[in-house]
Amino acid sequence: MFFIKFYTGLTQELLKVTTDCLHLAGFKLQCKILQQLVVVANDHLQSPINGADGQPHKFGSNKEYVVELFKTTIISLFPNLNQVLVETLAIKLFNSADNWKEFKGTVRDLMVSMRSFSSTQNEFYEHERKVSVLSLI
């Protein structure tokens, strides 16, 4: 019941924080939470998720609703982004929800495409670089 009632608000706020370059230090944790939200919507919720108006959505499935929620939230934050690209990446999030590395890479691809992250783009790869360096030692 918690997710059905609060899923939309949680997702919108998490996307706002994740796409804000001031919160880049929490990127990994934000991705993990986002991944859990995708898994919950995809596999665990039988009832329709409530929309922002508090009423159940009218889409055919929760997955369709969440893809549209991702798309509209991101486009509202970054109107310069291509809607098809954003929708493709949202669908890819669902398809990669069971693979942490691929999921995080998809979120990273979305951030890079926003161009507001272009100056901090290398920080997204910092964790992988550290792991690679440690494995050489």
Image (cartoon, rainbow, N blue to C red):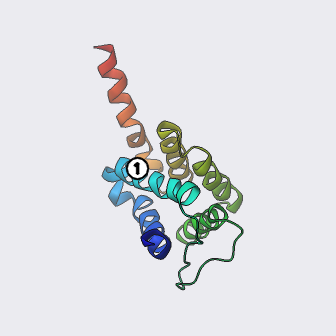
Residue at left offset 48%, top offset 49%: 118
Q: Is residue 81 above or below residue 112?
A: below
Query: Residue reaching furthest top?
Result: 137
Residue 122 occupies quadrant = top left
Out of 39 and 32, give the one closest to the viewer: 39
Position of residue 61 in the picture relative to residue 131 (left or right): right
Of the 4 image quadrants, the one containing the N terminus is: bottom left
Amino acid, disc 1: Lys
Crowdedness near tag 1: few (<14), some (14–19) or many (≥20) residues, C-alpha within 10 Å: some
Residue 23 occupies quadrant = bottom left
Q: Where's residue 59, x and y in %?
A: 69, 72
| Residue 114 can be seen in this image | no
Residue at left offset 32%, top offset 21%: 133
Q: Is residue 56 above or below residue 126?
A: below
Position of residue 88 in the picture relative to residue 100 (left or right): right
Q: Is residue 101 above or below residue 93?
A: above
Of the 4 image quadrants, the one containing the C terminus is: top left
| Residue 35 can be seen in this image | yes
Q: Where's residue 120, x and y in %?
A: 40, 47
Residue at left offset 47%, top offset 51%: 35
Residue at left offset 68%, top offset 62%: 83
Q: Where's residue 27, x and y in %?
A: 37, 50
- Is disc 1 placed on a helix, strand or loop? helix
Q: How many marks?
A: 1
- Name the residue carrying label 1: 32
Out of 63 and 34, give the one closest to the viewer: 63
Q: Where's residue 127, x and y in %?
A: 35, 35
